Image (tube, coloured by chain):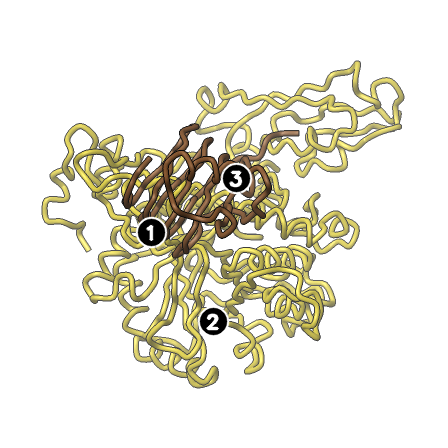
Chain colours: A brown, B yellow
Amino acid sequence: MVRGNAGDFTAVMNKGATIIVAGNVGDEVATYMLAGDLVVVGDAGRNLGNYLIRGNIYVGGKWESLGHNTLLEEMAQDDLAKLRAYFDTYGIAADPATFKKIVRLSEKPFYKSKK
Amino acid sequence: MPPVNGTFCVSVMKDRCINARMPGKCATCVEVCPYEVYAIDEAGEVRVRNYNACVGCRICSEFCPEDAIRINPAESEFLVRSPWTFPQVEEIHHKAQTGQYMLRGFGTMGYTPSFDNITVVPSQIASSPPRDKYREECDLEVVIGEDTCEHPIRMQYPFLFPAMSFGALSREARMALAVGAAQTGIISNTGEGGLLRDEAWLIKGYENEERTLRRWEPGGYLVVQWSTGRWGVSAGYVRAGDGVEIKIGQGAKPGMGGHLLGAKVTAEIAAIRGIPVGSDALSPCRYYDVQDLEDMKRMVAFLRDVTNYRVPIFFKLGPSRPYEDVKACVEAGADAISVDGLVGGTGASPAIVTQGVGIPTVALIPPAVQALKDLGVHRKVKLFILGGIRSGLDAYKAMAMGADGVGFGAAAEIAMGCRACMACHTGRCPYGITSQDPELRARLDFEEAGQRLANFIRATTEELKILTMLSGHDNVRDLSEEDLRATEFNTAAITGLKLIGYEKRVPLWENGQGNW
């Protein structure tokens, strides 16, 4: 739980942690994230979620650019409930309905499995 | 007649062989072998007639419907009988009988100094950190003619398909090269066989002449070659390309011109080249109208004029005295220079020339690069290295030694299916690549072959990226000799690279360069 801004390379290679940033994050955030949730209440910088493999990125503000292998998905009821619970627990004033969700495009973007 | 030294053991598994069980029913090996290793007798029985003639191409093994053939190398004859090995003896017999010297296709075979005794230095603490091939970007683009013409060529990758003429190659192979280049944004060179009309739209990714059906992205570049033979050359031809290449020489037969034997000069080829059907197309060995540097400059100026300064001008050199040759081309006004080494191949050439004439590719690079540096044009006038480049590893080494890119000639043919049997000159290529026989050409699907070429280029590009990035660079222009080490003394002496262990250039290179 970061009660302010976090910098560049936040959540890189995240393997299951839930990371909530009440402010903004910098560039190259959530690169190669493998599992877990990243919640950014503010804005993100360049190359967000580059080569994201699994996990979810929720952003309340804007981002400068998205990385490779990312996909925008509609917020489902589960996502909205999850964020509402986080915000209540940590006293964050934000509306989950305004958040965007980023997930991975392909689970194996480099080497295809042999059939 | 096998063209190179080396022997192989030919075994046929009789329990699998169709012919062994039913004489006369199958003679595939007899049909496909270029050197008559197998023979069929009147009773319809196939036997190994001449195992000494086997060159190890394994075409028989590939075509055998029962996978009954095994070819294994056996070196003892070469070690024990040199210099009078079987192929050498047969060659002398052949000359005694016919008064003719041997001709063959493909490039130099057998050991010559190569890139293999060079290793790549990865980056760690003592240099800028390695880049992550999986997560970071690498710049691979090469631009030709940026400051000299209206439409510079922007190659997506630092690779090209060098000159291989229509005539030496089949129509399908030329079309496949265009499709492969269109899918990867690189250059395909017509060679001196003239322009096959389809190439002009295929290279841009269009299926049809009207250019309404776009099939392949991003589209490539077609460089037309102007050679001593002037086959099929006209103002229209010169203007049809995205670049014009002046051919001075080539790796396989330096000091000689192009060879296309009459057997492969069909009506279509004769029409494009402007010669009678069935005549040998032997290009002159030099430009009779170019005697000195001023003439070279005039030729470049002439081509720039005809193309209205729209496109870059290239030179193609064989392996001779690279420092002076490259210097002359720069002074003549080249935008890019291709230097083709000893190992480079061809459709047909006297065997002694292919095997014995020229300088190995690896040794050409230092003097060529030094010539560019001395004239202050390194990385501005682009240098492409050709001649036996096999993979991204060879490409990396050539580029770290100072080249801007490399060409894949033989490797491209092999990507299309070739197995290096060296019989291109006969026109009997079993894959339809270097044949003019419609039945053999029918085996080559140009779209499928184009896809294979694109696959090969993409895989090779990834190899180059891996090496570029692990050695601490994110741009191929930043590669340098410091990224390489010679692993043994001879190569350090030839190339001027630092020697492993010693970590310095060998004393022969204390003046910073060779004796050019």
Nearer the camera: disc 3 or disc 2: 3
Where residue B353 sits in the image (x, y, percent)?
A: 46, 49
Count residues near mark 2 (Cα–Cα under 10 Å), then give few for <14, some for 14-19, many for 20+. many
Q: Residue at x 64, y 31 (%)?
A: B58
Where residue B511 sits in the image (x, y, percent)?
A: 10, 49
Q: B36 or B249, which lies in front?
A: B249
- Name the residue tied to disc 2: B243
Check the image and report above or below for B286 versus B63: below
Residue B503 location, quadrant: top left
Callout 3: chain: A
Residues at marks 3 and 2 touching, judged by CB atoms closer than 8 Å: no
Q: Is residue B247 visible?
A: yes
Q: Residue at x 57, y 52 (%)?
A: B347
In this picture, residue B254 sits left or right of residue A105: left
In the rendered image, the quadrant that contains the N terminus of chain B is top right
Callout 1: chain: B
Amino acid found under the numbered disc labelled 1: Val
Cα–Cα gap, marks 1 and 3: 24 Å
Nearer the camera: disc 1 or disc 3: 3
Q: Residue at x 43, y 36 (%)?
A: A86
- Name the residue tied to disc 3: A109
- Name the residue tied to disc 1: B476
Q: Is residue B351 visible?
A: no
In the rendered image, the quadrant that contains the C terminus of chain B is bottom left
What count of labels does the image hold? 3
Q: Secondary structure at mark 1?
A: helix
